[in-house]
Image: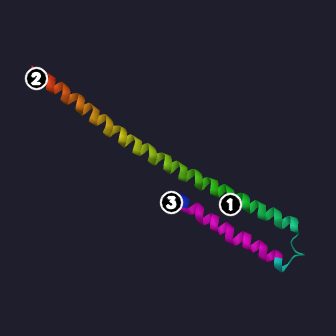
Amino acid sequence: MNIGFVYMLLLMLVDFCCTKGYLFVAMMRPKLLQIEEIFLKLLSILLIKMILFVMLFLQMLHKIIKWLFRVFKKILLIVLHKKYCIIYLKSFKMIFSH
């Protein structure tokens, strides 16, 4: 399974369950949870979501850089192949022109 997909599922799970759950509990029983506790829990959830987002972003950046290097390598191989083919043909013509 793709790691980015798992991160995105975790992000959605944290967003849906925890954030909505804490807000629902805070609305239903305000005396049970203090405002500071709710704020700290929401802040910790936000921190978890931010870490997951950064991990997902770094993974996507890694894939993009890997793809760019692969494309650059192919272009470089094509250019070098053409260059050496032209040099080889010129040397071949010079040998047989005498």
46 vs 91, nearest the viewer = 91
- The question of residue 46 being in magenta is answered with no
Question: Does residue 96 sit above or below 3 in this rendering?
Answer: above
Q: Quadrant of the C terminus?
A: top left
Q: Secondary structure at mark 1?
A: helix
Residue at the spot of label 1: 49
Residue 29: image location, x then y, percent: 85, 78
Give the residue furthest to the right.
Answer: 31
Q: Amino acid at mark 2?
A: Ser
Residue at the spot of label 3: 2
Residue 63: image location, x then y, percent: 50, 50
Q: Secondary structure at mark 3?
A: loop
Residue 76: image location, x then y, percent: 36, 38
Residue 28: image location, x then y, percent: 83, 80
**Label 3 – label 2 distance at C-alpha:** 59 Å
Give the residue furthest to the front.
Answer: 97
Q: Quadrant of residue 12?
A: bottom right
Quick one: label 2, few (<14), some, or many (20+) residues within 10 Å? Answer: few
Q: Which residue does the image show at 62% across and 64% down from the upper left?
A: 10
Residue at the spot of label 2: 97
- The question of residue 17 being in magenta is answered with yes
Quick one: label 1, few (<14), some, or many (20+) residues within 10 Å? Answer: many
Q: Quadrant of residue 32?
A: bottom right
Q: Amino acid at mark 3?
A: Asn
In the image, which residues are magenta? 5-26
